């Protein structure tokens, strides 16, 4: 049963004040059974209030916890969330909620990642799919999710498998990703040092584009890796989509580290330029001593907070989003999260319950 008494009040404008704060608060409420009220939803964003992506996440977590909600409407600036039971497994299609931004304004991977740690703790097998953007500019993309996020979570003992059904390139598109989640027992990881390099890999993903586009991208990746002095295992893939698109993802795996960079193609921009940006972004992480990149740090924080034992990792850049997520987690759990470093610089993170 949910914890009785007054809900925990979270200011949605704190820190970065965006969607990550809201999603973290909802996930932690479900996991701890502590009711929560979020005010000033997305108060730090250019467009405040609940958007369709938020509503999709809210609906999924509500289904898992049979929660009671107040204020869960498009554009709402406040939301009360009261879980009435511990999370249970889901077998759902999470279609994007319509709203002012129009159908499809959601990143399918953001939705799935928001519910993934909750479903892993249900003790039941879950199978669900989310519809929305699967490849986005400055957003979580499917190839990064499949090759960096999911393998990293497996190191904690969180087992999930994904499948791209339909690609959606950019805001407003409606692709689809399926996700299967096993009941998992989480253990902390020591990623204080990278260890041996296992390999550097890359994928050039295209839809509805001539074959030579991907071929040129692969050739440029080979040249870049040669002059950088390391080998890269690169491949291309053509995916089903309702509109043209391209994405280049480069990542590296070490014994105790994972990190990468993904860049989406834009109309009028040559694939060589997209490849260059993705490669340089990856090399920026690779040249550091970091064991996770700035995006993966966000994604493993809740699993680390739930895991038995201590987790340690080094991030190449401490973002305001990460600091905000840390703040939200600590509102719900009596947990030690030690951070050495400052915003926009590298940092060492220790998480211990």
Image (cartoon, grey):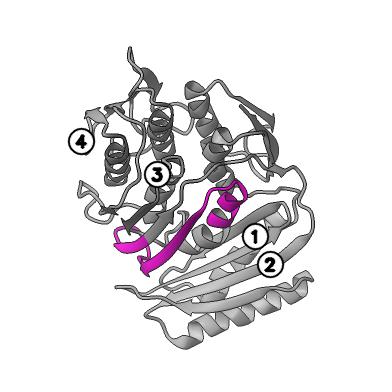
Q: Which residues are magenta?
A: 150-177
Image-quadrant location for residue 234: bottom right
Query: From where the camera sits, is residue 107 visible?
Result: no
Q: Is residue 326 above or below residue 105?
A: above
- 208 and 119: which one is in front? 119
Q: Position of residue 25 (x, y in %)?
A: 41, 31
**In the rendered image, which quarter contains the C terminus?**
top right
Q: CA distance from mark 1 to mark 2?
A: 10 Å
Q: Which residue does the numbered mark 1 point to in the structure image?
A: 282
Q: Is residue 260 left or right of residue 254?
A: left
Give whichever of discs 2 and 3 has the lower sequence position. 3
- 338 and 310: which one is in front? 310
- The mark closer to the camera, 1 or 2, is 2
Q: Which residue is painted at 42% across and 65% down in the image?
A: 163
Q: Which residue does the numbered mark 3 point to in the structure image?
A: 115
Q: Which residue does the numbered mark 4 point to in the structure image?
A: 73
């Amino acid at each position: 049963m949910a914890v009785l008494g007054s809900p925990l009040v979270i200011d949605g404008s704190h820190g970065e004040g965006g969607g990550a704060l809201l999603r973290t608060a909802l996930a932690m409420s479900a996991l701890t059974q502590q009711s929560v009220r979020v005010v000033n939803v997305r108060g730090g964003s250019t467009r405040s209030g609940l958007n369709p992506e938020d509503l999709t996440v809210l609906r999924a977590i509500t289904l898992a916890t049979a929660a009671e909600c107040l204020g869960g409407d498009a554009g709402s600036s406040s939301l009360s969330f009261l879980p009435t039971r511990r999370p249970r497994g889901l077998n759902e299609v999470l279609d994007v909620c319509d709203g002012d931004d129009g159908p499809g304004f959601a990143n399918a991977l953001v939705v799935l990642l928001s519910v993934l740690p909750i479903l892993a703790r249900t003790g039941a097998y879950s199978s669900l799919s989310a519809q929305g953007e699967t490849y986005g500019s400055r957003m979580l993309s499917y190839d990064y999710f499949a090759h960096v996020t999911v393998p990293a979570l497996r190191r904690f003992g969180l087992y999930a498998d994904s499948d791209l059904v339909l690609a959606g390139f950019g805001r407003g598109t409606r692709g689809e990703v399926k996700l299967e989640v096993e009941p998992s027992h989480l253990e902390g990881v020591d990623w204080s040092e990278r260890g041996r390099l296992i390999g550097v890999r890359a994928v050039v993903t295209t839809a509805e584009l001539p074959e030579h586009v991907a071929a040129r991208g692969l050739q440029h990746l080979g040249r870049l890796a040669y002059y950088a002095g390391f080998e890269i295992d690169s491949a291309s893939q053509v995916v089903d989509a309702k509109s043209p698109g391209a994405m280049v993802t480069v990542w590296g795996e070490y014994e105790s580290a994972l990190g990468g960079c993904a860049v989406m193609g834009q109309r009028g921009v040559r694939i060589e330029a997209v490849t260059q940006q993705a490669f340089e972004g990856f090399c920026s992480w690779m040249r550091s001593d970091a064991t996770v990149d700035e995006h993966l740090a966000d994604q493993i924080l809740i699993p680390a907070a739930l895991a038995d034992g201590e987790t340690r990792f080094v991030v190449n850049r401490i973002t305001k989003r990460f600091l905000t997520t840390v703040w939200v987690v600590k509102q719900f759990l009596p947990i030690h999260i030690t951070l050495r470093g400052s915003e926009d610089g590298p940092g060492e993170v220790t998480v211990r319950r």
